[in-house]
Image: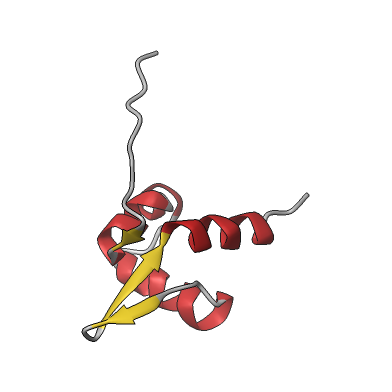
């Protein structure tokens, strides 16, 4: 199996976050941005705002995922 290793920037855009979280593969939603909006409102998805745009710190998102992981 030849798996491509993808790297993500320290501050991800919403499109990069959608790809990072694999939203298209796990959600039946036709609008992936709605999934991210839900995660921001209901699950406290970490983000910062720069110039009226949300950016998602990779390290904080990883910690958020780990914290929400059932063990």
Tell me the quarter of the picture where residue 47 sits. bottom left
Q: Look at 38% across and 67% down and name the residue there.
A: 56
On screen, 22 above or below 64? above
Task: In this rendered view, identify the residue nearer to me: 37 or 16.
Answer: 16
Task: In this rendered view, identify the residue nearer to me: 34 or 69.
Answer: 69
In x, y percent, where is residue 7? 33, 40
Quarter of the image for the N terminus: give it: top left
Q: How many marks?
A: 0
Q: Look at 32% across and 60% down and name the residue there.
A: 12
In x, y percent, where is residue 44? 55, 77
Residue with the most extreme left position: 51
Residue with the most extreme right position: 71
On screen, 20 above or below 35? above
Q: Look at 29% across and 56% down and name the residue there.
A: 16
On screen, residue 59 versus residue 51, left or right, reads right
In x, y percent, where is residue 17? 35, 59
On screen, residue 58 versus residue 12, left or right, reads right
On screen, 50 above or below 20? below
Residue with the most extreme bottom position: 52
In x, y percent, where is residue 27? 43, 57
Task: In this rendered view, identify the residue nearer to me: 58 or 20.
Answer: 58
């Amino acid at each position: 199996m030849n798996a491509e290793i993808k790297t993500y920037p320290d501050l991800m855009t919403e499109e990069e976050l959608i790809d990072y979280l694999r939203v298209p593969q796990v959600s039946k939603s036709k609008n992936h941005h709605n999934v991210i909006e839900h995660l921001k409102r209901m699950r406290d998805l970490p983000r910062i705002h720069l110039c009226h745009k949300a950016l998602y710190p990779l390290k904080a998102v990883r910690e958020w995922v780990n914290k929400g992981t059932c063990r």
